Image (tube, helix red, strand yellow):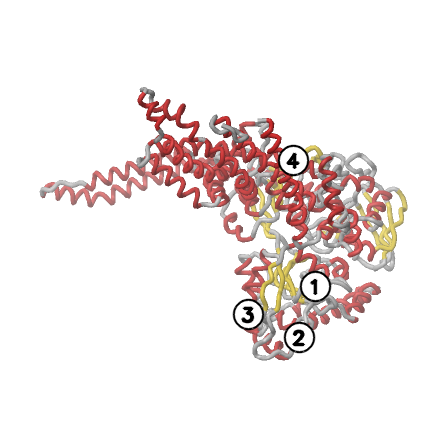
Amino acid sequence: MGRYLFRRAVEALVVVFLASIAIFLIIRLIPGDPAVQVAGVDATPEQVEEIRESLGLNRPLLTQYTSWMGGVFQFDFGKSFTKRVSVADLVRQSFPPTLELAVAAYVFALAIGIPLGIAAAIWAGKAPDYLASIYNLFTLGIPNFVLGIILLWVFAVELDWFPVSGRVSITDDPIAAIHRLALPAMSLGAIIAAILARFIRASVAEVLAQDYIRTARAKGLTERVVVLRHALRNALIPVVTIVALQVGTVMAGAIVVEIVFTRPGFGLLMVDAITGRDYLLVQAMLAILVLIFVAANAAADITYGFLDPRIRVGGTE
Amino acid sequence: MSERNYWERIRRRGLSRRSLLKATGRAGIGAAGLALVGCGDDDDDGQQQAAAQAQAQPQQQQQAMQQQQEQQQQEAAPAQQQQQQAAVAQAQQQQAGPMQGGTMRVGTGRALAEHQAAFPFGAWGEAFPLYAPMLEGLTRYGKTLDPEPRLAESWEFNNDQSALQVKLRPGLEFHDGKPLDSEAVKLSFEANIAEGAPASQVAGVIRQYIDNIEVVDKTTLTFNLAWRGTYIFDVFEYANVADVDNLEELDGYQRINGSGPFKFDQASYRVDEYHRMERFENYYEPANLDAIECYTFPDESAMALALEADEVDFTNVLPHPLHGQFQENPDIELQLGGPVDSIFVIGMTSKTEGGGSDHFDNPILRQAMQRVIDRERIVEELFAGLATTRNVLWAKHNPAYDPARDYEYFNLEEARELVTKAGYGPEGTPMLKIATFGGPQQEILELVQQDAATAGINYEVDRLEFNIWVERFLGGTHTDGYCSHFGFFQLHPPTLPIINYQMRTPVNACAYDSPEYQAIIQAWKDAETDADRAATNERFNTLWDNEQWVTPVATANFLFAWQKRLNGFSENATGQQRWQDFWIDDTV
């Protein structure tokens, strides 16, 4: 396990390094001059040039990259061109709301998707299975921002059960925080729940057809024990894969959902940063997203080993 | 933000949970009764009875409905009475004067951080609520170009209007208690134009209009003017008095030591999200409110929802199409901004070294473009009638406004003649590119496109990202033209070529310049009398009629909206409010 972790860590670093180069170059390929953005529309060309120099934008690309990477190793991500505060502070402010939203979306997805998938598998061809199909049909066909707007209109504006916008920190007031998280989490998590339900249905159905399940039933175990204790553990392996793979979907979805529900977070900040050609901010945020994705996949691989002893990380059995 | 009880909202509309349930129950019973009555006997007696019953049915129904209505009226009467009482109480309260206390929640589409350190030196448009409460100027205009006292108590010109002596109110302070005296005001103005100062439009007018500033005593200072006359008040309209020792900290909003009726609560500040301003007790006219909270929304629709859900109290950037929806909302007060405002314009690029247009370099073609714009249709279709057509650049109160020139230019035949006169054949111009960054500007261009093609001006709408659009706009390098909206047409005429990007010389968004234009600007500067100024205004209007490098379309009015319990709204000639006047009526 130790060797495996070391190897994954090295691989992750290589991926992040290559991604950082790609990020650095791609953002600079987008037309638009950040110095103009910073200088403002009233600036003279001389003022724009001064600002370009102060931001280091007139240095060679390699110098800019090495300077940035040098700062990153010292946990100094630089100062945002447009917000005038340190990138680290901005990320520190914006990341927790997005993390809250992502976790809440996953909780919702797991709470709905797993039971729905299991029920659909156990009662295949019956009402629960049809219910799951209808749920999948609707949620997979509706983009998350459209679902968000519908939920907002019905539950927040018309019924007034939920607030329209804003965020309360979960550490300040957990009840109010969850109240404000409910609709955005549903918008973001509904689609993941549908995907989970489909995979779990297939997975549970396959596991329930295995010989050891028949043996368990033959031993006189109740169906509940058969499913929950014997079948579920193996059937949940695809869940781990989906949760890991959906990290990118959740982060992308969070951008739109944050705008719909006026929640602060990574998404809004990322849009601002790209629009404003805030190179340092974009670089830092994308690098963090890459790290999250890599870490999620590594965690998924490690979790397999715990779920199924036959799968050993490191390839031995 | 506060939670809102659904039933409380229903109750305020004159209904109650009980009456709703009663009405529902009654309707159910009525339906059941109708169903029972509908089942008659087969025999004759039964038929007769059924016939008699059927005859009696409408009467019975009518009686039941009448009873139900009377019942509802009786139940609604207390609620109506309540509403009337509330209205009376509100009127009485307004007569009695503003209530003290409370927090006003403002929704805005712009973030504080977007304006960076330049904001002490100019604030306008939808960004006013962000920091205008924290910063004050010497004077502000009223409804027209008549200045009203703010930090300045009084002022007086010398004989030839080449100097303005300003007297400050006694005892003024910055928010940290530092004296706001003549020296502080002088330093604040000079900081605008100091080397290394952030770029701002106000810096331009300060450099042009003011020669120097002399401190006479603690509360008196003299502005020696490079341009004689009342133009200086255009500077005061936008130049805020800021603490020069605070300027570096302003970068990133580390600390804002302001001069206005509210002070910045640094601890509350969340970038791009929220900030809070608290009443400054030592202001010369302390505010009625305890605090103002500013919430930044990523888009206007989200803000409109928040307003409807009573999560904000005030906004000045409500989308016009929502006017109809909010008009029916009994809790929301709406007001269209006016009497003066910025305008949508179409600018046409002259030929430059770097590019520009071979076609719109010809003023005759520009005149043709002026005549293909159906301004009335634009106002009706795009702005739901909530704007005003604009045929001339100047606002009506502007000294340069000439009613004789303010008529509907839309005339496709005339436009076609001009296109021919400009040297184009029956097919008209080649495909031109007129740029926009989206929004109403794009809609205007799309709406005008067909009429323009009919007259022989063929163009495609070139949708650009905002950053790219701005770069070309500032450099006058849009291919053929652009559509946008800009203000300052309500200010004194000479301010326009200083402060407006389309009017500046030699480099402006339309790449337009001419000896006559330069001569007019000089004539404004040299004018000694009102007659001189009027003659120069007329000269400019004639030039503009012929050259039309930028043609107006319609006004870009703010749509203000606020919860009815909020009072004290006012709007001056440049769309600014007096933040100390707002108050909340808790009885509503």
Q: CA distance from mark 4 to mark 1?
A: 39 Å
Nearer the N terminus, badge 1 or badge 2? 2
User: Judging from the image, what secondary structure is the residue with disc 3 in?
Assistant: helix
Q: Are marks 1 and 3 in contact (CB under 8 Å)?
A: no
Nearer the N terminus, badge 2 or badge 3? 2
User: Which three-letter amino acid code belongs to the residue tagged 2?
Assistant: Ile
Q: In this rendering, do the residues under marks 4 and 1 share a single chain?
A: no
- Tell whether B286 sits left or right of B584: right
Q: Nearer the viewer, residue A249 or B210?
A: A249
Residue with the mark numbered 2: B364
Query: Residue B451, which numbered label?
Result: 3
Q: Disc 2 is attached to a residue of which chain?
A: B
Residue with the mark numbered 4: A93
Does any portion of residue B340 appear in the rendered image?
no
Q: Disc 3 is attached to a residue of which chain?
A: B
Instruction: Tell me if mark 1 has few (under 14), some (14-19) or many (20+) residues whose alpha carbon lies within 10 angstroms of its own.
Output: many
Q: Disc 4 is attached to a residue of which chain?
A: A
User: Which three-letter amino acid code belongs to the residue tagged 1?
Assistant: Thr
In this view, the mark in front (4 or 2): 4
Instruction: Tell me if mark 2 has few (under 14), some (14-19) or many (20+) residues whose alpha carbon lies within 10 angstroms of its own.
Output: many
Query: Relative to B291, does residue B375 appear above or below in the rendering?
Result: below
Instruction: Tell me if mark 3 has few (under 14), some (14-19) or many (20+) residues whose alpha carbon lies within 10 angstroms of its own.
Output: many
Query: Residue B477, which numbered label?
Result: 1
Q: CA distance from mark 1 to mark 3?
A: 25 Å
Residue at (37, 22) in percent of width and height? A225
Q: In this rendering, do the residues under marks 4 and 2 share a single chain?
A: no
User: Judging from the image, what secondary structure is the residue with disc 2 in?
Assistant: helix
In this view, the mark in front (4 or 3): 4
Q: Are marks 2 and 3 in contact (CB under 8 Å)?
A: no
Q: Nearer the viewer, residue B54 or B427?
A: B427
Q: Which quarter shows the N terminus of chain B?
A: top right
In this view, the mark in front (1 or 2): 1
